[in-house]
Amino acid sequence: MRPLIGIPCHPAYRHGSQRPIYGNNRAYVHAIEDAGGVPVLIPLVHDLSTLEALLAHLDGLLLPGGQDIQPRRYGEEPHPRLGDTDPSLDEFELTLAHWALQEEKPILGICRGMQLLNVALGGTLYQDLESQYAGSLRHMNQDRPRSQVVHRVLIEPGTCLAAITGEREFWANSIHHQAVKEPGKGVQVAARAEDGVVEAIEVPTRRFVVALQCHPEEIYRQVPACARVFSAFIQACGLREAVPQPQRALSLPVGAA
């Protein structure tokens, strides 16, 4: 049976009518599908406890990209160059991240998803690389196609990511202005850009908790390392326990509004 992979939606507005909708980029859906999983979009519900009925059926969680995370979630005041934030989205995705960690479900974080995972584990972020990280590369490239690779990602030897990809480095796209600053509890840096900015993290004590700062869903067809990450994620999600364990009650993250 193909594993079910939860992908949180974000609030948006339909072009033209401006009707409020929930959704996410198609690239996440097709990357999971092509790797052998079944993508399940999770709407941002008003009562997060109602998610329990759905989460009990999921085999893994993909934390997607998106807007900035509120700095109060990691104990900082907003920087002047902080982008748009959404407290409800932060609460929603942090709740899902804590659930997956609590239930030992495999997690794949992408861009904001990597940052959110680090915050969920007690880490901090650079709110704006250009102004806070001296000598940084140009990491925000919204003016270029999302599938355009722009810099190398250097993988740390001996990491789970190194074992998954079988490579020392790969070329990646880059569409972010924030990044991991202080890693959270149990978090290990798995890769960096040539300027030292963190490009991947993992929690090696878990079955599969890996996150990339780039957008592998946009480049997995042209970058084998990214395709292998999706394949390894789906494989980990397919390793169900022989005797299902009872799901514990869904708990909100500390500091949730």
Image (cartoon, rainbow, N blue to C red):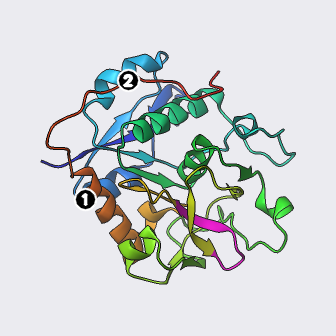
State left or right for residue 105 relative to residue 74. left
- Residue 90 location, x and y as percent? 60, 34
At 44% from the left and 76% from the top, the residue drawn is: 162
Q: How many marks?
A: 2
Q: Is residue 109 visible?
A: yes
Q: Amino acid at mark 2?
A: Leu
Question: How far apart are labels 1 and 2 at the CA level?
Answer: 24 Å
Q: Earlier in the sequence, mark 1 or mark 2?
A: 2
Q: Position of residue 188 (x, y in %)?
A: 56, 62
Instruction: State the residue position of label 2.
Output: 51
**Which residue is tagged 1?**
235
Residue 145 lies, in percent from the top left, at: 55, 67
Tag 1: residue type? Gln
User: Measured along the vertical axis of the image, is residue 154 above or below residue 86?
Assistant: below
Give the quadrant of residue 74.
top right
Q: Secondary structure at mark 1?
A: helix
x, y percentage for residue 247?
30, 27
**Label 2 residue SS:** helix
Position of 6 relative to 127 (above/below): above
Q: Which residues are magenta?
A: 193-201
Q: Residues within 10 Å of mark 2 (few under 14, many from 20)?
A: some
Q: Is residue 21 left or right of residue 165?
A: right
Split into 4 quadrants, where in the image is the C terminus? top right
Write the residue at 62% across / 73% down: 192
Front residue of 193/245: it is: 245
Residue 105 falls within the magenta-colored stretch = no
Q: Which is more toward the observer, 125 or 7? A: 125
